[in-house]
Amino acid sequence: MGGFSTDLYLMALLILLFGVFAGSLGAMLGLGGGVLMIIFLLLALNLPAHQAVALSLIAVIASSSMAGSVYIKDKMTNLRLAMVLEAFTVTGAVAGAYLAIGMPVWVIQALLGCVLFYTSITMFRERKVDPDGSETAPREGAGGRGSVLDGSFYDEQSSATVSYGVKNLKLGSVTSFIAGAVSGMVGIGGGVIKVPVMNLVMKIPIKAAAATSNFMVGVTAAASAVIYFESGLVDLKLAAPTITGIMIGAYIGTRLLAKSRSAVVRKVLAVVLSFFGAVLILKAGGILAW
């Protein structure tokens, strides 16, 4: 009973291989990889919903740990901003969990799907870019020059230091609360909302937004994963290939982000947002169910 069957070996191998892909894309875009893993686990492998969610959370933690450590070392993560926004996101997630009990989830799914489609269109629009394709960052933060939330990082692709200011902090905080609430109600990773919010609303360069989001999603997922683990819903035989694949992919993703043009990262994110928008609308219509 404690051994591995052929089917289990095959499932573990598929999870490992897809984990590399999900981890790469998740770390590159700041999504954590879990949002891709849960769709794969549910639709491709037909795992029970609770088990798939548990493995998805494990994937987010693994991706965040690997990518987060690299981004913090490279000073791409804005830790001060992450702490501020995460407080609102976690509060929103708790509120969303309660709201989900008395609110039709399909309404939220349809609304979020439309929002993600609109956001993807906005992401496709070019921001001001330098001739080399790197993103031009604003010079002043929300509180003027020298705001404690302002940041900078060395962009390996353009071989230049990018300094930026954080704009619209209040609006960004409120939107982060909403992002947490929606994530709690819909069950989709908050990274697909956090990265566009930081980039479009708070005017943070896409690479810094992705790096900061990677740190944030891991903190949120860790709190939820404990509950699933204590409930015995984490399948350790499948968790091992999930973690291995995700961590390999996450490291690859950090290198891809460092060497990619900001405009390319924005377009890839826009495609992913469109995909998740379609998934949510299909879920709202009852075509996809989990």
Image: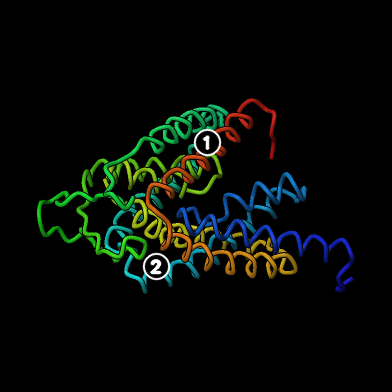
* Mark 1, secondary structure of its residue: helix
Q: Are marks 1 and 2 in contact (CB under 8 Å)?
A: no
Q: Looking at the rendering, in which quadrant would you find the N terminus?
A: bottom right
**Residue in the picture at 39% in, 50% down:** 89
According to the picture, the residue beneath numbered tag 2 turns out to be: 71
The numbered dot on residue 152 is none
**Residue in the picture at 43% in, 32% down:** 121
**Residue in the picture at 38% in, 40% down:** 178
* Mark 2, secondary structure of its residue: helix
The local crowd at label 1, few if under 14, some if 14 to 19, many if 20 or more residues have their Cα within 10 Å, is many
* Near-viewer residue (72 or 283): 72
Q: Amino acid at mark 1?
A: Ser
Q: Earlier in the sequence, mark 1 or mark 2?
A: 2
Q: Amino acid at mark 2?
A: Tyr
Q: Position of residue 258 (x, y in %)?
A: 41, 63
Q: Position of residue 66 (x, y in %)?
A: 50, 70
The local crowd at label 2, few if under 14, some if 14 to 19, many if 20 or more residues have their Cα within 10 Å, is many
Which image quadrant for residue 245? bottom right
Look at the picture and state if 274 lies above or below 32.
above
Q: Colour mode?
A: rainbow
Q: Position of residue 283 (x, y in %)?
A: 63, 32
Look at the picture and state if 181 lies above or below 261.
above
- Left or right: where does residue 213 sit relative to residue 228? left
- Left or right: where does residue 244 sit relative to residue 83? right
Q: What is the distance, in whole Å, between disc 1 and disc 2 at their CAs?
A: 26 Å
Look at the picture and state if 277 lies above or below 258.
above
Q: Position of residue 185 (x, y in %)?
A: 52, 40
According to the picture, the residue beneath numbered tag 1 turns out to be: 274
Report the residue that reaches farthest toward the front. 131
* Near-viewer residue (159 or 230): 159
* Near-viewer residue (157 or 58): 157
